[in-house]
Amino acid sequence: MPAQSAAKARAILDQAIDALGGPVYLRLRDSECTARLAGFERSGAIGGLGEVHILRQLPDKNRTEYDLHGDIVTIYTADKGWSLDRGGVEEVPASDIAAYQEQLKNDANFILRYRLNEPGLVLRYDGSEVVDLKQVDWVEIGDSQGRQVRIAVDRSSHFPVRFVVISRESDGARTEMMTTYSNYRPVNGIQTAFQVSRFRNGQQVSQVFYNSCKYNTGLADDLFTRVSLDKHFTKKK
């Protein structure tokens, strides 16, 4: 029955939230992580490999520095975005901002922290299976805008281990973006996946190996503004 299915799905997600840190996880304010990021070409070869510095101010601000000196940076907020490279600072195209907003709404942690009580959200228990030698329970989530996501939760640890976003392209083609989470470690009371891999229609597109993470350090608001990028570029001249 739909009501029973929804109740079971919500119970599984509540267990996942508790396993990830409960109130500490839900009340996260900011994070600062360093990682190695690899991108993959269609052939499967590594198309790019480098160190990244990722700063987030929840719920919707992101600053990613793609080199050790902070000379290549992108910043996204709820409705704005800027990029810095050796040529200067530019506004991010509106299409990129829209893509960031959509990605955020479909992010597993964003959903668990902010969207589960959203009006119009529909939860459904979608069965159990073995994934990577682990018994998992699948939960399906749909919203009033037609978004559809599936989360696989490890039945033993209760950690999310897979997250699938299903969408349709403009030509009607079905696209499946899958994210896998592994190598969980506790950081300041929050269980954190130190390895994250992404696949598009079964083909790997990226892999992130986190080196370190710090939470609730009080990141300054101006780190997520164009002014910070303009100042950095001026100093480098």
Image (spheres, grey):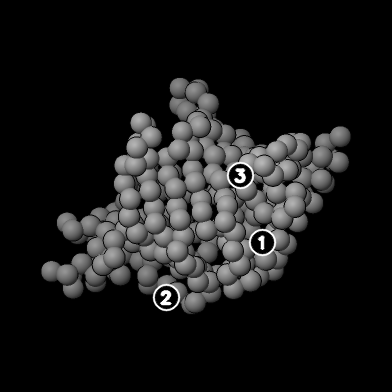
The answer to whether 82 appears left or right of 190 in the picture is left
Give the amino acid at mark 1.
Answer: Leu
Q: Nearer the viewer, residue 64 or 135?
A: 135
Residue bearing the label numbered 2: 220
Work out which quarter of the rendered image holds the N terminus and state it. top right
Q: Give the number of the disc on residue 210.
A: none
The answer to whether 22 appears left or right of 94 in the picture is right
Label 1 and label 2: CA atoms lie apart by: 26 Å
Q: Residue furthest left?
A: 237
Instruction: Mark 1 or mark 2: name the one nearer the start of the chain.
Output: 1
Give the amino acid at mark 3.
Answer: Arg
Work out which quarter of the rendered image holds the C terminus and state it. bottom left
48 up-or-down from 183: above or below: above
Tag 2's secondary structure?
loop
Q: Residue at x 49, y 46 (%)?
A: 197
Q: Nearer the viewer, residue 72 or 182?
A: 182
Location of residue 221 (image quadrant): bottom left
Percent coordinates x, y for residue 101 in the rendering? 48, 49
Label 3 and label 2: CA atoms lie apart by: 32 Å
Give the amino acid at mark 2.
Answer: Ala
